[in-house]
Amino acid sequence: MLEQLSPDVVYDIDSRDTIIMVNDAWSVFAAKNDGVSLLPPGINGRSLWEFVKDPTTRIVYSRLFDRVRAGAGASTFEFRCDSPSVKRFLQMEIAASGTGMLRCTVRTLGLEPRPYAAILDPEAGRSDHLMIICSWCKRVSDGDGAWVEIDEAPVLYRVFAEELPPSVSHGMCDDCYSSMMRTLDEESDIGSAEHPAA
């Protein structure tokens, strides 16, 4: 049975990007997705950067945080956070909520069933091969500069004669990086027009 649209997941970070609050929807989502280590109170007081390992993704989030903290207004973008059997289409809004503090709100825009994808199953065994998944669109790198839909991942790792899904690391594909950079540039232009120099 397809999971239902969930309430908005909300979390607050302070001026040093430390998580200081998560709402009940965060806890429900974490519990359903084997995220026991992400449940409060243990999640509070931890740096957000513990959970964002990819350098490119960190740069994008840092720029988003900086522009919101600089007073340019809220920033909104779409991304995916899939489970092994469901494609989740989400929207993130990052808004100022106090001196240096930010409120991040994640809204579910839609859900689609998908054929089971072992690569997304934290309980699945893993081979020694490493596969990169885009943190934003969930396409996977073929290792030669192309990014393909995650449903094609089994074909890729069978090429390496491996029956088990590969180990997973996250990155950011060129398309998503370019799209986010354009969004940041457009939002900066809008902010400049709304707040002209004196």
Image: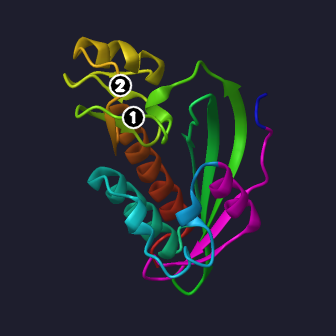
Farthest-out residue, left: 144
The one nearer the camera, 110 or 151, is 151
Residue 41, x across and y down, in percent: 62, 79
| Residue 177 painted magenta | no
Which residue is tagged 2? 164
- Whether tag 2 and tag 1 are in contact, CB under 8 A, the answer is yes
Question: In the image, what residue type sits under mark 1?
Answer: Gly
Residue 5, x across and y down, in percent: 79, 41
Question: In the image, what residue type sits under mark 2?
Answer: Leu
- Magenta range: 4-32
Residue 119 lies in what quarter of the image? top left
Check the image and report above or below for 34 versus 174: below
Residue 30 seen from this side: yes
Residue 162, x across and y down, in percent: 28, 19
**Helix, strand or loop for disc 1:** loop
Sequence order check: which comes first, mark 2 or mark 1? 1
The one nearer the camera, 76 or 196, is 76
In the drawing, does residue 123 fall left or right of residue 173? Answer: right
Which residue is tagged 1? 125
Instruction: Characterize the local packing of mark 2: few (<14), some (14-19) or many (20 or more) Cα atoms within 10 angstroms.
Output: some
Check the image and report above or below for 129 versus 14: above
Q: Residue at x 47, y 46 (%)?
A: 183
Image mark for residue 59: none
Residue 20, x across and y down, in percent: 58, 80
| Residue 6 painted magenta | yes
The one nearer the camera, 19 or 165, is 165
In the drawing, does residue 126 fall left or right of residue 26? Answer: left
Check the image and report above or below for 30 versus 113: below
